Image (tube, rainbow, N blue to C red):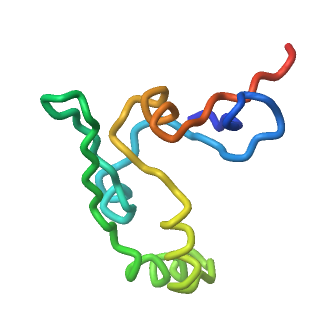
Amino acid sequence: MFVVGLSASGNAPATHYVSAGAISDEMAALLPCKSVTTDAEGNQQITTTPGMPEAVPALAAKAGITATKTQINALYAAIDVSDQEPFAALARLGLKMVQVPL
């Protein structure tokens, strides 16, 4: 997976970052995942599964990482995990890839 900087204008500095690619079913079950469909009128319908924020602190502790439920809730509120293709998700969020000189 590649990590790419994003911003509303496509200009630096990056205000957000995207990492696109498949994740395991186990990881997806932990995260608040959005499923995006389009209705007959062409409007996007978004359904979100809540994930399992209550399980993450204990899993993190097993890996030697300290994470509180408050921190996990803040992280979940800040991320967007969806089944959309990357460019469709970026458009939905009003973001563009930051262009950097070669």
Residue at the extreme right: 101
Q: Quadrant of the C terminus?
A: top right
Numbered marks: total: 0
Residue at the extreme left: 40
57 or 6: nearer the viewer:
6
The image quadrant of residue 92 is top left
92 on left or right of 48: right
What residue do we see at 65% from left, 43% from top?
A: 17
Q: Quadrant of the N terminus?
A: top right
What residue do we see at 56% from left, 86% from top?
A: 68
Q: Is residue 58 above or below residue 43?
A: below
Residue 39 in percent (x, y) is at 16, 34
What residue do we see at 49% from left, 82% from top?
A: 57
99 or 26: nearer the viewer:
99
Residue 38 in percent (x, y) is at 22, 33
Residue at the extreme front: 41
Q: Is residue 3 above or below residue 73?
A: above
39 on left or right of 67: left
83 on left or right of 17: left
Residue 35 in percent (x, y) is at 27, 46
24 on left or right of 47: right
Residue 20 in percent (x, y) is at 50, 36
The image quadrant of residue 14 is top right
What residue do we see at 37% from left, 61% from top?
A: 32
